[in-house]
Image: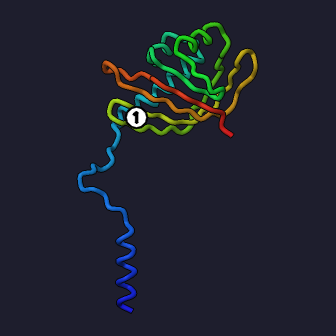
Amino acid sequence: MKALAAALLATCLGSMPVMPADVPPPSVPDPNVVATMKQLAQDWGDSLVTGDLDKLARILADDWSNFGAAGKPTSKESFLASLKDGKHKLASFELGPMDVKVLGDVAVVQGIVTEKRTDDGKDTSGKFVWMDVFVKRADKWVCVRSTGFRAK
């Protein structure tokens, strides 16, 4: 019986992954950065509702792009132009849970939002999942990539 127990223990221990000793433990994100990311998400939505495109332009990096459900990239310039000409209008929004992963000067933010909106005059309201990638440039966080899709 002791031999069987020893064999089982050896098998279990032998199948466990071995972690190198020099792997640092997962870092705890700076709560100030997490709060900043959540505030930027709120500011983004607020700027769409109020039409404050200058504020939105400061959140988006000049090299920002978005891939949405259509699968086509949208540049900062074309996105702001579509908002300015009224093709897209956000009437209201409510942010749901968000997850922020901070990797040095990069932050990845994932979340859920419920929106009341129109696109080209058509009601496109609903619940959406989204992800934004922010980079700290010149001591300021700016969004460089985004994606979002309708939740099912």
Q: Residue at x 45, y 23 (%)?
A: 144
> Is residue 64 toward the left or the right of residue 125 in the image?
left
- 9 in relation to 80, above or below: below
- 73 in relation to 25, above or below: above
Tag 1 secondary structure: helix
Q: Position of residue 24 (x, y in %)?
A: 27, 49
Quarter of the view holding residue 114: top right
In this view, the residue in front, 102 or 115, is 102
Colour scheme: rainbow
Q: Residue furthest right?
A: 122
> Is residue 87 toward the left or the right of residue 47 in the image?
right
Which kind of residue does numbered mark 1 sit on?
Answer: Val
Q: Position of residue 111 (x, y in %)?
A: 54, 36
Q: Position of residue 94 (x, y in %)?
A: 60, 30
Quarter of the view holding residue 81: top right
Q: Quadrant of the N terminus?
A: bottom left
Q: Residue at x 63, y 32 (%)?
A: 149
Read off the residue under disc 1: 34
Q: Position of residue 80 (x, y in %)?
A: 56, 12
